[in-house]
Amino acid sequence: MTVSADDIMTVVAARTLRDRAVCFVGIGLPSLAANLARRLHAPDIVLVYESGAIGAKPTTPPLSIGDGELAETADAVVSVPEIFAYWLQAGRIDVGFLSAAQIDRYANINTTVIGPYDDPKVRLPGAGGAPEIAASSREVIVVVRQSLRTFVDRLDFVTSVGHHAGHDSRARLGLRGRGPIAVITDLGVLRPDPVSQELVLTEVHPGVVVEEVSARTGWPLRISPTLTVTAAPTPVELTALEELRGRLA
Amino acid sequence: MTVSADDIMTVVAARTLRDRAVCFVGIGLPSLAANLARRLHAPDIVLVYESGAIGAKPTTPPLSIGDGELAETADAVVSVPEIFAYWLQAGRIDVGFLSAAQIDRYANINTTVIGPYDDPKVRLPGAGGAPEIAASSREVIVVVRQSLRTFVDRLDFVTSVGHHAGHDSRARLGLRGRGPIAVITDLGVLRPDPVSQELVLTEVHPGVVVEEVSARTGWPLRISPTLTVTAAPTPVELTALEELRGRLA
Amino acid sequence: MAEITSLHAAVAGLVRDGDTVALEGFTHLIPYAAGHEILRQTLHHLTLVRMTPDVLYDQMIGVGAADRLVFSWGGNPGVGSLHRFRDAVEDGWPHPIELEEHSHAGMAARYVAAASGLPFGTLRGYVGSDLLERTANVATVTCPFTGEELTAVRALDLDVAVIHAQQVDRHGNVGLWGLTGVQKEAVLAADRSIVTVEERVTAFDSRVTTVLPAWVLSAVAVVPHGSHPSYTQGYSNRDNAFYAAWDAISRDRGRFAAWMRGHVLDVDDFGDHLRLVDAESALAG
Amino acid sequence: MAEITSLHAAVAGLVRDGDTVALEGFTHLIPYAAGHEILRQTLHHLTLVRMTPDVLYDQMIGVGAADRLVFSWGGNPGVGSLHRFRDAVEDGWPHPIELEEHSHAGMAARYVAAASGLPFGTLRGYVGSDLLERTANVATVTCPFTGEELTAVRALDLDVAVIHAQQVDRHGNVGLWGLTGVQKEAVLAADRSIVTVEERVTAFDSRVTTVLPAWVLSAVAVVPHGSHPSYTQGYSNRDNAFYAAWDAISRDRGRFAAWMRGHVLDVDDFGDHLRLVDAESALAG
């Protein structure tokens, strides 16, 4: 079995989700990882989709956030205004799962635009649920492929706040959740320094060298003195992932 | 067939409701009158109950505002917050139907307390939906038995606003509905003067003399120069009402 | 995560003296069994919250369990006054009760704000009403876009919400149908919640329209007919005769106290209560 | 009061050049048939509103029907970019489009405020985001009870709301089930509304969870499969292949324009459109 960079990113993201956690999942890699966790160590994880499905248990990872199977397998289906007001804003979400087009050293996220807002190089989809997922989930996990294009010194646009300008600046904004606790990439895992909140490389995936991670980071990357190597995906994990992917195809 | 004072009050109230009107109905006489209208000239009247039933078509006039038949026969059942926000507050109600323990010359209503608030002679049920029904319905009709106890010079407590202090004072409060257009009693019908908004006796029921109405009013009652006599309830109206009452027993 | 437990254990574990407690229900699904259990466990100094306090709150106020009542309409629907409520307010028996009263629209907006994690809700309401002078929890707020002045109400945060529902499924989720009032908001406005249900099912009846996931509930107890004399759509009809009979029972302090001892306080559980009430109703019938 | 009419008549009578129009739908129930009819009637200068503009809005923007877009997430779900949307924003083709963008939570609160007859909604949102600098419709409001500063969003009042639903009953009421998104709020936020439905029924399917009474709707038109390539729970599945194929169709201005003429603008109605798309899909299949 060959392990792609996306595979290990998905497996590591799935591992971070504990059973019974209530996860607000966006589409794509977050949804794939959350559904993988549900098939592995977290059968009672609660998946909440912004389309209004609470406790969805799709057999196929949804292609879109509003797929019919989400409603059919959900414990409860509610309106979109209710999902955001009663469930996310009220602080009932344990883990918010986000992706990013650009991310900075404090795990602030851009999903709006590359280049100047009024004269964009690439117009991205925009905010969606991310600003409030980032603000109100108890914890946030970001899953994003690592490159100089994505790991930038300065975001072109701050769509969603991570640790803002570091230190206690996030809390001073009045945001209620803890913010990002991990950024999982195809190369390793970055976690915020407990004091400065700057992202520190704490894990590399098997076969990845630190220099490669630094080279794909748009700022001088801090490396943890206790850097570890990610446990390689197990055959059980990879089989489950392949099954999921197979269903998707 | 003998005609009680309550009968004629109910029949006259029913007559004021036009077909297809959307009526927010409280329990008791308002609900009885609205259901009578539905059986007579207004088969497509839309009855909205604050318990969340929209377009209820009860075969029996509900004893309480949340009877099961309301939900079973309704076009839509919604939550109580939704009834007040999306339906009443947003201005979708044509006619709000209220009763009163005390009413003054500007059709302001007390349903809270008789005597001082902190040392009440009679503690009444309180506001319920009335303040916002009175404020936000396009028009309000009040149904109340007339006596010196109910038609008072000064309310012990203003629960719901009618025409406030008269003239344009209601509009200046920012209330969006027109306010009370008729007060229907067991003796006759009072309507606000188009300028001062003070209630004027415009109709007496058959057999009622003006002096009796004045004697049962706690302020010098204005009498319309074009005072008319209510058309007597027809056999069809009374039979329908008796049928309704029979179902209630 | 909801524990499926006995009603006794749920109340013992989750309700404390001095709590702010809402036993919600809008004619339908009023949690009488849970209210009685609270009285049997002699909880005191409660702040009772409900839009439409009816006979259950008359019972709870009459035995002196409540120091405060937050409400919008207190009556015996279709019958008349709540005599114990009136006696407490008018004559301070068994002790004075502090009132905080609102309109239905205001109470609903307060529940919604609390369920949404906001400190206040906005509505068009209370304007010109003397209600404004009687509570500190209604104020004004100005629209930052139009300059219009609107009414603000303080979020109604609860210690405990108590509701009755039709079913609990095998995952501990609770399902309701019919008029569901403000029950979802009450549960989501509370730190702790107790739900009594008619029955435990493998999968919900197709009539279920509102689901409360197991993980937002503290405890679920199966109590058939736990809403009597209120009703549970699909399971029981409203006992209108009991509501009418309550008028005479509750009018007199002595008769009320004796009835409460005999039918609520000194019985083992709600099943016993129902058997007593049924037997008397058959005799009267 | 809803008139049961043809989609052509509904659009002709209710949508005007320059209107603020929301064709809502959250993956499910997207009103493609109505959107195409708006394009065939060559309406212009529209402000298009939607939380999740997808391929339908790509089509409408690509033919130049919209001057403004009010939205929170614009993409082809599971596929990638909306190329026509990007071309309009990045290169002003066929003409520049003005954007007003929000978060989902903000858009939802804006719809709720409008449906509730309030000038603004309150939420915890946008704080620290550059979104704040790009719209005048987000501000702050202070809680009069706690002094806390919260985010206010302006009510999203619409001229016209357009949605697709499963059924209309014999009274003209519309019934939906599955993910119902923000459709009720959109209809209640609008002066006028158009609903396309899969079928007319005597009485609703028991799966219906949301009902819009006839008297809040302007027009209802029966258009089977009117949500294609989106889906209608109980009637059709999402045509994921079409969403994938759109990527190539929409990448090139010329191919897009030809496709729109051949499949949307120059066909008689949505039935013809579906027959064309089906036939091509069978050939490709």
Image (cartoon, coloured by chain):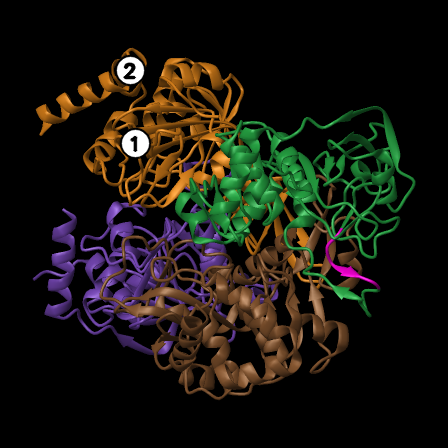
Chain colours: A green, B purple, C orange, D brown
Q: Is residue A113 magenta?
A: yes
Secondary structure found at label 1: loop
Label 1: few (<14), some (14–19) or many (≥20) C-alpha neighbours in 10 Å = few
Residue type beneath disc 2? Asp
Tell me if C247 is positioned left or right of D227 in this view.
left
Residue beneath the point at 71% across and 63% down = D137
Q: Position of residue D123 (x, y in %)?
A: 65, 49
Tell me if D247 is positioned left or right of D4 in this view.
right
Q: Position of residue D141 (x, y in %)?
A: 72, 51
Disc number for residue C269? 2
Disc number for residue B107? none
Tell me if A226 is positioned left or right of A36 in this view.
right
Quadrant assignment, res A87 = top right
Residue beneath the point at 55% across and 38% down = A241
Label 2: few (<14), some (14–19) or many (≥20) C-alpha neighbours in 10 Å = some
- Tags 1 and 2 on a common chain: yes
Range drawn in magenta: A110-115
The reply to whether discs 1 and 2 touch (Cβ–Cβ < 8 Å) is no
Name the residue that disc number 1 marks: C202
Quadrant assignment, res C74 = top left
For marks 1 and 2, the one nearer the N-term is: 1
Tell me if D24 is positioned left or right of D127 in this view.
left
Secondary structure found at label 2: loop
